[in-house]
Amino acid sequence: MQLIDGKSTAQAIKEEIAAEVSTLVGQGKKRPHLAAVLVGHDGGSETYVAYKIKDCEQVGFKSSLVRYEDDVTEEELLDRIAALNADSDLDGFIVQLPLPAHISEQKIIEAIDPAKDVDGFHPVNVGKTVIGLPSFVSATPYGIVELIKRYSIETSGKNCVIVGRSNIVGRPLSVLMSQKAINATVTVAHSRTKNLKEVCASADILIAALGFPEFIKEDMVKEGAVVIDVGTTRVESSETKSGFRLKGDVDFEKVAPKCSFITPVPGGVGPMTRVSLLLNTLKAAKNR
């Protein structure tokens, strides 16, 4: 069993990005500029945005944080997005989800200029991804594919089962894994899939993205499979100072011995999601 180390892979990619930024600046071009819009004080969102700002510092990007309280109106947020779209110094920006219930997340996503949509959530970018045109790919699927490539995992003709069908991970990932660059045969499974255990056990590459801690058990994984765990659920723990720990969708201790490759949680897909946002921002800056 080989551990897929997303943390060290992400660090290597950051160093590559930093070198490219240094070259761009040395040529007299401006630094890539990423902004994050944060509404309210959700703990997970606060932490994630703080990491993104730190990531920008590490690779030499300029970063900006736009903050609003929970009571911001949808109209106010849309007005700010219009201003960010028009800001010539800004290469890309994200609106951190989730948003308060009185704001339509889909309306906000669709208001972002696709050329600055470095989260890859706008329907234009999703559509371009589906038909194989250059686009900003959603960060988590982008990171997973990059991990698979960098670990030279064989994908051509392999059976890939993705458990989870979200618009952020499962659906776009199924498209990427089936495209000619990967050439896997993809099955998208979910909570209504019949014989789910048998479907999962048929996978050469099993990707768990459903948000239920330790859902994937050892009898759902075949010997020698590659297992990618996208899950990051906070569960109570007496073993940590915080009183919580992150659990993946895979029962790691029991599943890992059966695998040829497996991602840990934390330290697997998470760091690659963050670095993929940097890759998209660098691409946006070069496009402009």
Image (spheres, grey):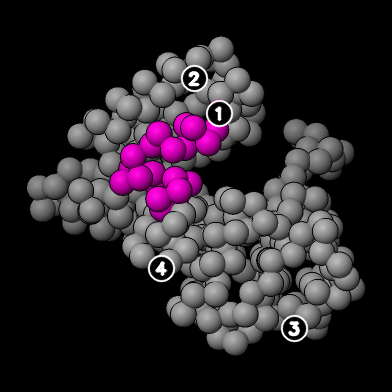
x, y percent for residue 256: 78, 71
Which residue is the site of mark 3? 224
Marks 1 and 2 in Cβ contact (< 8 Å): yes
Horizontal relation, residue 286 to residue 278: left or right: left
- Between circles 4 and 3, the one closer to the viewer is 4
Type of the residue with mark 2: Glu
Answer whether residue 266 is magenta in the image: no
Q: Please report the residue visible at 46 percent of the width from the left and 80 percent of the height from the top.
A: 180
Task: Tell me which numbered mark, 1 or 2, is placed earlier along the sequence.
Answer: 2
At label 3, the amino acid type is Gly
Residue placed under numbered mark 2 in the picture: 74
Q: Residues within 10 Å of mark 1 (few under 14, many from 20)?
A: few
Please state the extent of the stretch shown in magenta in the rendering. 104-125
**Amino acid type at mark 4:** Gly
Q: Which residue is mark 4?
A: 132
On the image, the x and y values in percent for residue 88 come to 20, 34
Q: Image quadrant for the N terminus?
A: bottom right
Provide the residue designation for mark 1: 104
